[in-house]
Structures are given as C-alpha cells and as structure tokens.
Image (spheres, rainbow, N blue to C red):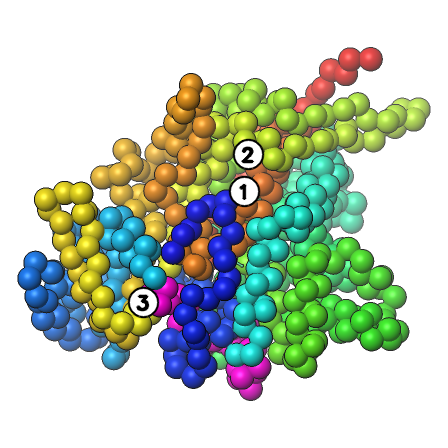
Amino acid sequence: MDDDFYNPLSVTPSVAQTWGSLSNIQSIIPAASLLFMGTALLALPLIFIAARFNVNTPKEPSDGDRRSIWVFPYTIPIVGHWFQLDRSAHSVFALKFGIDTHNIISNPEVVRSLLQKDESIFQPHPTAWDVLHKCFAVPKRSKPKYSLIWHELQSTLEYLLQEPHLSNILKSVIRNLEENIPQMLSFMDSDVDQHSWERFANASFISNSETEIDLMSLIRNMLGTASIPAVFGRSLMEKYPEILHDLYDMDKGMSYFLMGLPAWTPWPTIGKAYLARQRVLQGLDGLQEALDAIVDEKHIDSLWGDLDDVSEFIVKRHAIYKENALDITERADIAVLWALVVNIDLIVFWQLLYILATPGLSDRIRKEIAPYIKVTKPVSIGGFAEAPKLTISHEVLSKNCPLFKASYFEAMRLSARPSSTSKVMADVTITGETHTANSRSYMFRKGEYVTIPHDLHMRDPKYFDAPETFNPERFLVQKNGMLSAEMGTIRPYGAGRSICKGRIFAERACLALVAGVLVCWDIEPVDKKTGWVIPKQERSSAVCRPTHETRVRIKQKTFKWGD
Ligand code: HEM
C-alpha cells in the first residue's frame, strides 16, 4: 500500500471484491469511504467504554518469538489512560468490543510494516455502509445499488488529485480567496452590511479601520465560502446561505448518528444536528434535481442558473448517480461536502493562530511568502477606493516557502487526531523494528480489526522533542544545500488506500488563505496583557475544535504604493 503524498493511488482494486460480507462493505460503498476519517476516531471512545464492561482474556501467545497482543484488562479504569497506554510497552494492544477484537497500533515500525501489506489482508472501511446510512441518511434500500457503482464512484475521487481537475478546482478556490481576503472586514456597524463570515464570527464594530471578532469562525467561514462554490458551484450557497453552518452543526452530531441515537434524544446537540443534516440534504437534493433537469433539458428554477460552474468532479458523480437510476434521496454527495469543509476549515485556524502566537514567527513568514503574494493598488474614483487587488501563487507557496509549509505540518501535528481502520482478511504476522535485535512480531487473526490512531505517534516524546510545543523547525531539512519542509513520519491524512484524497487541495487552499490574511491584515489578541492564548482542543472529526473563542482585533495593513 503506497501512500505517497503527491501520488494519486490507483483505484483499481488489487483483489476481486464480492458483495455480501461485512469485510467488503467498504469496497462497495465508495462515498462512505471518505467518511471513515472521522468515524474510527469517533468510535474509539465508545470502544473504550464498551471494553470497560467486557471481561477480556489475553490471547494465546503465538509460536516462536511472536508476541501475543496485550489485551486491555477490564479492571483498568478507561478514562485518562489513553496516553499512558501509548507510552507504555504496549504500543500494540487489543480491545474486546462485543464479539469483535480491535487491535490498536501506535508503534510506527509496526504501522509501517502493516501498511506495506497487501490490501487483500487489511481492508479499510469495513463499516462504511453503516456510516453512510447512519451518518449521511442514505436509505438502507440503496445498498445493492452502491454495490454496482462502487468502482466508478471511487474513481471520481481522483478528480481531487489528478490534473487538470485539481488545478481547475484550485483555480476557482484561489480566485474566491483573492477576491474575499482584501475585503475580509467591512468595518460596518450593522449586521446587514457585514459579510456573512463577519456576522457568523460575531464581529463588533470598533472603528472604520478596526474590528473585534472571533478568529476561528472568521477564518473557517472564509475558507468554506471559497471552497463550496468552487466544488459545488455558486448557486448552492446563494440558495442555501446557511449550509456551511448547518454542516458544522451536523458535524457535532456525527458520533451520535453513528451510535444510532434518534433525533428526539433529550440532548440539544443531537436534535440540532438532525435538523441541520436535513437542511443540508435539502440543498444538495435541490442541486441534484437541477442537474437532472439540465441533463434532461427540462425547466429548472432560475435561481440555480445554468450551473456551468459546478466542478467536473461533482458533474461526473451526478452522471454516475443518474445513469444508475439512484433517486435523489439515495445520492451521497453530502459525504463529499462534509469532507470538503470539516477538517480543512479548522486546520486553517490552528495554523494562523500558532503563527501569530509564536514570537517573531509571523514576521519571518511574511518575509518568506512576500515574493509570492502580490497586493496591488486599488482603483479609486474620487474619494472612494476599492479593496487592494490580491494575487496568490499557490504552487510556489507550497514549493518555495519551507518555514511556512513547516508551520502547516506542525499545526496538523498538534491539532489533527486522525486514525485509519481496516479489517483483517486473513491471519497475518507483522514484524516491527526489523532493523534492530529487539524485533517483535504480532499476530492478527482473520476477522479482527486494526486501528492506527496516528495522533498518538504525532505527540509521542520518543519521536518529537517537547511534543506539546509548536516548533515548525522540526519539519525543516537541508537537502543539497536547500532548505525544505518534509512531513516525515506524521500521518494527519491517514494512511494506506483510504488516505485522504483531498490532501493536496487542502494544503494549497490552507496555505493560500493563511498567506493572504497575513499579508493583508494585522491581527492582535483582544487582551494585550494576557496576549495570545491557545485554546484547549476537543475531538471532532480528523481535526480538533477549539473549546473557546479567540477574540482578536483586526486592522487593515497600510500599503505604500509606488506610483
Ligand atoms: C487538512 C485537512 C484534512 C485532513 C486533516 C483530512 C484527513 C483525512 C483523514 C484522516 C482521512 C481518512 C484516512 C484513512 O482512513 O486512513 C481522510 C479521508 C478523505 N478525505 Fe480528507 N482531510 C482533510 C481535507 C480534505 C478535503 C479538503 C477533502 C476534499 C473533498 C478531503 C477528502 C477526503 C476523501 C475523499 C477521503 C476518503 C478517501 C478514501 O476513502 O479513499 N479531505 N481525510
């Protein structure tokens, strides 16, 4: 299983896949595959709790020098032991969850060996159908249809990685960012005159050159407002301006959907998440109907326009749904929309915040990115001037700005909580640390699950000096006299076949937004005495949410225009 960052993986399965067994559900439900990024993670606390109520017997030691996997005893209190466990000798251990055994692996050597195994042995996403059905409301009856269209739908994910599709989507995102960043703040007192991203971030008017606002809401709304139209076309957000916020509310309910808790559960987040999901589905169903009507040359609501800006990626998926007679309620693009915004919109906040909060770093980064971000004089008529014109070279930002890129990796190391899960398809022995005399082997049996919680390694002091400290320099390497940023052993995008297909898109869009904001705006914490405070994190999908707001004061930078 190759998971090279920049290389799209071939979508042709290496083993024949048949419909019917649980282990094959993932291969039949491609849209669901992209959902698993959050679900393994969301499921982990449940696994722990369930394990607490199961008396587990250690597995029989296997032959020779093979190690039996340490089974988490039910008598050990669960909460609070996660990190201790990882840093103990048991960086491979098993949990019993009903009749299922979940092997949790955080030892990087074992992870590496495991990822090299053929996918006929470790198949990702075994519970993907459940996720698609429970989290994204795809009707149960659609299961057989998805079994038929899986390969085709899965192949559309390549549009997020391959040219010219990737560049076409990115071009549109960058154009939206170039337009919105210079006029990020309106400096208007009234809500009605503010941009949607300002309203949602509780902007408070201070003066006509300064605004107080919540940085997380502002930044994530800016990115969502640029990326959704780039992929789904402008009309979706114009018709459903709340869709981004509905997605965030829906995301808060993902673990509850997965548990199967009903909408009437007396917990406000759950009811809110169900309603939010309903509205997102309504918007996407409307878009699918409009696309159907265009293909059938029927009349469509004029508010949809001609939809010629919907990306080839979504148009291709629509064609597959339509050709295979999936009715509107069976189509699963809600999963794509969710994956498009939930993680990247948070990473962009963490990267910007860490840069601002690290003394001297924002100045160093501004200097590094300056050649690739151009701000030009706005047109002015009489006393009225337009916003400055911004041009962002996103490819070069990624290639030529090692410190900036390293700050992106470091923000992910500190705020991402990704995991990858597969089902074991045949008994197998995995050997880690093969280069040392201390080599250990572990036996995994057919029918068990393996989960790699990548974040345990990403914060392990054995591999990262002062792991809680933001230090982008740890990702800088000298190669042939040139400085570059390398991700090394962290896996914020997961690993193996199910590795994130939006990873290049995410990196480019995130760097473009952070660079544009740093160049155009001055940002300070509201309370200058206290200074920058990095909020605590709460688990969300693959990237954590902050537990509280970060109120900041923002002023437009003054530019000296050479005439
Ligand atoms: C920094 C932002 C992001 C992070 C940290 C992230 C993380 C992840 C993770 C951890 C997985 C699961 C990998 C596994 O099972 O091993 C995943 C899957 C996926 N992500 Fe992302 N993601 C990000 C942004 C995006 C974006 C912007 C898109 C665009 C649509 C996207 C699309 C996908 C898809 C399609 C999959 C499923 C791939 C498959 O199953 O074949 N992601 N992501």
Query: How far, Cα to Cα, is label 3 from label 2?
Result: 36 Å
The answer to which quarter of the image holds residue 18 is bottom left
**Residue at numbered disc 1:** 507
- Is 328 one of the magenta-colored residues? no
Under tag 2, what secondary structure?
A: helix
Under tag 3, what secondary structure?
A: loop
Q: Amino acid at mark 2?
A: Ser
**Residue at numbered disc 3:** 121
Q: Which comes before the other along the chain, label 3 or label 2?
A: 3
Under tag 1, what secondary structure?
A: helix
* Residue 474 in view, yes or no: yes
330 above or below 199?
below
Q: Nearer the viewer, residue 166 or 89?
A: 166
Q: Residue furthest top?
A: 563
Residue drawn at x 55%, y 86% is 141
Query: How far, Cα to Cα, is label 1 from label 2?
Result: 8 Å
The answer to which quarter of the image holds residue 497 is bottom left
490 above or below 303?
above
Mark 1 and mark 2 in contact? Answer it, CB < 8 Å.
Answer: yes
Badge 1: how crowded within 10 Å, few (<14), some, or many (20+)?
some
Q: Which comes before the other along the chain, label 3 or label 1?
A: 3
Q: Position of residue 381 (x, y in %)?
A: 92, 26
Q: Amino acid at mark 3?
A: Ile
Badge 2: how crowded within 10 Å, few (<14), some, or many (20+)?
some
Q: Position of residue 68 (x, y in %)?
A: 12, 64
Front: mark 3 or 1: 3
Query: How far, Cα to Cα, is label 3 from label 1?
Result: 31 Å
